[in-house]
Image (cartoon, rainbow, N blue to C red):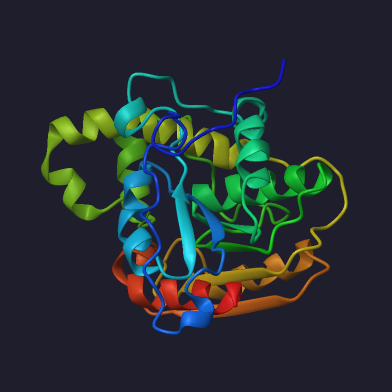
Amino acid sequence: MSRPAPAPGTDPWLPFPPPAPVPAPEPAHSHRARARLLCFPCAGQGASAYLPWQRLLAADVEVVPVQLPGREGRATEPAHTTMEGLMEELLPVLVELTAQTEAGYALFGHSLGALVAYEAARRLEAAGRVPLGLAVAAQRPPHLPLDREPVHDLPRAAFMTTLGLYGQVPVELFDDPAAVALAAAALRADFTLVETYAPADGPRLRCPVTALAGLADTSLPPRAMRAWQDLTEGPFTFRPVPGDHFFVGERTDEVVGVLRAALG
């Protein structure tokens, strides 16, 4: 039996339905179908991080934030620690979701979300649903080895301190011990997934790839983001952006502008 078609706002994976399109000033474009942009958040974050994008892109793009287990409204669910386990649950949702759009779809992921978006794109292409594009931010491409020791199996205090040193958690989090305790379990699951993910052999992507790098990201040299080019046969665009590992939330207008241009 096939899975019922997911509807943003009624499916736990898709808690935030995109707003109605803003009427365009040119009548010729007022009824143009909008491309659908599936957005995957960074480690420790939830889908609500992309709510501002829904407003900013409403005229051109249908932004659909994807909520992974273990955060926000799904905080009581265990977070996935393997990409394979996550994809077993998530891929059927995405297959149905990408079949519903007339104007095509694209994927965006930040940090952890970049790896999830990439693996989703691979599997969707294999299912015959080639995206308009994949955009990734602040994450090494998965064919490159880690340039540091893994952190996911460190004791909690050392784990959180190390993430802080790498600039992978906001420094203000450490001002609240309760928040640290709450975040540690979810972050550990996320970093376990990131540090153990090894893509299976397969063809390169066919879709265009855009890689965005924070110029002050201490956890990832911007030049490493250029290696995403190795993973696609399609066009590749590299865009450095001012900011650290969290530039996606801090430079929203600039990032959204890059994505709008990429989707044409």
Q: Position of residue 112 (x, y in %)?
A: 51, 47
Q: Using the image as rendered, state which of residue 215 and residue 117 is in the foreground.
A: 117
Residue visible at 70% across and 21% down in the picture: 2
Q: Is residue 161 above or below residue 21?
A: above
In the displayed structure image, the side of residue 203 where residue 48 appears, left or right: left
Q: Residue at x 40, y 19 (%)?
A: 77
In the displayed structure, 172 sits above or below 152; it is: below
Horizontal side of 111 relative to 116 (left or right) equals left
Q: Does residue 75 lie above or below 222 as drawn?
A: above
**Relative side of 248 to 27, left or right:** left
Tell me if 54 is positioned left or right of 60 in this view. left
Quadrant for the N terminus, please.
Answer: top right
The image shows residue 203 at horizontal and vertical percentages of 88, 52
Asked whether residue 162 is in view, the answer is no
Is residue 211 positioned above or below 125 on the image? below
Can residue 127 be seen here?
A: yes
Looking at the rendered image, the quarter that the C terminus falls into is bottom right
Q: Which residue occupies the foreground of this view, 224 or 3? A: 3
Question: x, y (%) of residue 170?
Answer: 26, 53
Quadrant of residue 215 within the rendered picture: bottom left
Q: Residue 51 location in percent, x, y?
A: 32, 54
Q: Residue at x 35, y 57 (%)?
A: 167
How many badges with numbers are in the image?
0
Closer to the camera in the image, 3 or 247:
3
